[in-house]
Image (cartoon, rainbow, N blue to C red):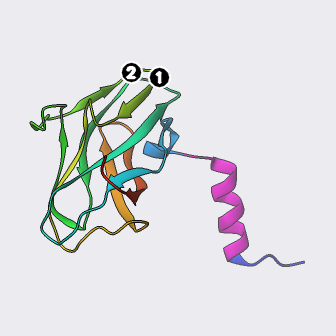
Amino acid sequence: MLLSPYLLLLAASLAIGPTGPSSIDISANHGTVYQTNKEGKPTQGFLQIHNTGAADTLTGVNCPIADTSSLVGPDNQPIANLGIPAKQDVVLAPNGPHILLQNTHFSVQFGSIVPCSLTFRGAGVVSVYLYAKPAP
């Protein structure tokens, strides 16, 4: 019986297992973003990051629906990075560090989904979705 070269390649990749950044144990829950009433308005995003491995650092965020996506502190001032302690969860929340999206390309309507990516020093890029909800 002859095996397809594609099947052999797939079997080899499965036998090797995860390598590189994907072997670091960082994940994130899909989060929320506040809806806006028109394009150009800033909004804020929130989510929870899970780390089941070694300490890592969140170094950047990108949400393509905005000209600028930043990691900010509770005072909305930019922060360069955020430590993610080993084997702990970190919450990006309204009264803590969170994502600030500035100059949105369209209004963020209730129920819409905003794709974003989080960049970690060790884990690399983790993709998330933020679901739009009304601001308090």
What amino acid is found at the position of numbered circle 1 in the picture? Gln
**Left or right side of 106 for 52:** right
Q: Which residues are magenta?
A: 6-18
- Residue found at x 11% / y 38%: 78
The answer for how far apart the CA atoms under marks 2 and 1 are is 6 Å
Is 76 part of what is drawn in magenta? no
Asked which secondary structure carries label 1, the reply is: loop
Mark 2: give few (<14), some (14-19) or many (20+) Cα within 10 Å: some
The residue at which mark 2 appears reads as 85
Q: Is residue 108 above or below residue 42?
A: below
Please say if the residues under marks 2 and 1 sit with CB atoms less than 8 Å apart. yes
Q: Is residue 119 above or below residue 91?
A: below
- Residue found at x 39% / y 29%: 90
- Residue found at x 39% / y 23%: 55
Marking on residue 88: 1
Is 12 part of what is drawn in magenta? yes
What amino acid is found at the position of numbered circle 2 in the picture? Pro
Q: Residue furthest right?
A: 1
Q: Quadrant of residue 48?
A: top left
- Residue found at x 30% / y 51%: 135
Question: Percent from the top left, x then y, of residue 47?
Answer: 40, 42
Asked which secondary structure carries label 2, the reply is: loop
